[in-house]
Image (cartoon, rainbow, N blue to C red):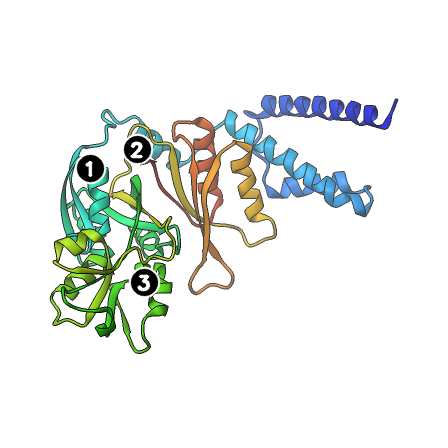
Amino acid sequence: MSDRDRIESIDDQIAALYVERMALIKRQAEEEPISGQADEKSVVSRVTKDVPDDMARYLKQVFDGVLETGLAYRRSLTLPDSPLRDRIQGALSAADRTFPARAVVACQGVEGAYSGIAASRVFAIPQTVFFKDFDGVFSAVEKGFCRYGVLPIENSAVGSVNAVYDLMKKHRFYIVRSVRLQVSHHLLAKPGTSLDEITEVFSHEQALNQCSALLASLPQGVKVTVATNTAVAAKTVAESDGKTACISSRDCAALYGLSILKSNVQDRDNNFTRFIVISKDLTIYQGADRISIMMTLPNYAGSLNRTLNKFSTLGLNLTKLESRPLPNTTFEFMFYFDFEGRPDDPAVLSLLSELDLGSEEFAFLGAYREI
């Protein structure tokens, strides 16, 4: 028998033993608790004890996969008890899960803001109410003045809007819909104002970051001022005595009577901002196929990889993975995960329950559809 034939024979034996192992796991699933990290370490230590050092690390990787997929199989057979699972199942059993055509919606800024445009994309007939800042939007939803809020959550060029994530965690709100808008920024000023007369440029911090090349090209001494919103910036320039400009939308140019000095001043043509629709109540509308969570991970080598393997084992596609340092901690991070998955899938429910029960900090941000 050739070496290739022997390898294939060994592969067949490994596959047969793996199936046998999974059959035993299935039989024991209702009799024994899922083994934790200490049990897995014990197994890896035992099977690598007499293995040469140059092979032990590779054998460890093999058994890490065997043990992780075994746990995933057990999760699919027996859902762990979890308040989160109960809440999700309760939302899925609601009598009416049709996304509404009309609603009172809170947005940050003033008329012409991108969040207002996003609200018009999501709702057929929105009644939009504008608030000064993100806090105002959350407060309006919290108090029941508005049923939903529409907020930016991330930009393709500059990443996540951390302030919104922080408020989501603080208020324990949920995402019920999301929408991606292509954002084109323009340099606007009052009619008759020339580019070389500009002494100050207003815009939202995210928009300024997305237009760094334009700002670098302006004459030295031009002041850059952060506004709470691109539409607020346009309104500020419209009410000024001239010699100011803003980075805002074409809609705001028409709305506030401004002229376009330069078009499409964003650094990247494929500049998209993703907006979320938030709700105080956990509601899962029909067609939900995306889930967002945020969580901390144990501070040991391989913890992120182990978590990613849980998604990979179930064939779940991660559409976002981002981390940020936690304030007042030493090398601890909050991780943001978006993934494609149906909340009524038992395997997905089991995974969410496990992550919720096994993480020091975990927040289920919602199951929703993106348009």
| N-terminal-most mark, 1 or 3 | 1
Cα separation between marks 1 and 2: 16 Å
Cα separation between marks 1 and 3: 28 Å
Q: Badge 1 local density, few (<14 within 10 Å), some, or many (20+)?
A: some
Extreme residue in the bottom direction: 221
Instruction: Tell me the quadrant of the picture where the C terminus can be found.
Output: top left
Q: Is residue 331 left or right of residue 262?
A: right
Q: Which residue appears at 24% of the width and 55% of the height? A: 134
Please state which amino acid type lies under the numbered disc 1.
Phe
Cα separation between marks 2 and 3: 35 Å
Which residue carries the number 3 mark?
208
Q: Which residue appears at 39% of the width and 38% of the height? A: 291
Q: Which residue appears at 24% of the width and 66% of the height? A: 202
- Label 3: which secondary element: helix
Which residue carries the number 2 mark?
284
Q: Which mark's residue is nearer the viewer, 2 or 3?
A: 3
| N-terminal-most mark, 1 or 2 | 1
Q: Are marks 1 and 3 in contact (CB under 8 Å)?
A: no
Please state which amino acid type lies under the numbered disc 2.
Ile
| N-terminal-most mark, 2 or 3 | 3
Q: How many marks?
A: 3
Q: Position of residue 239 (x, y in %)?
A: 11, 66
- Label 1: which secondary element: loop
Q: Is residue 298 left or right of residue 324?
A: right
Residue 44's image quarter? Answer: top right
Q: Which residue appears at 38% of the width and 48% of the height? A: 270
Which residue carries the number 1 mark?
123
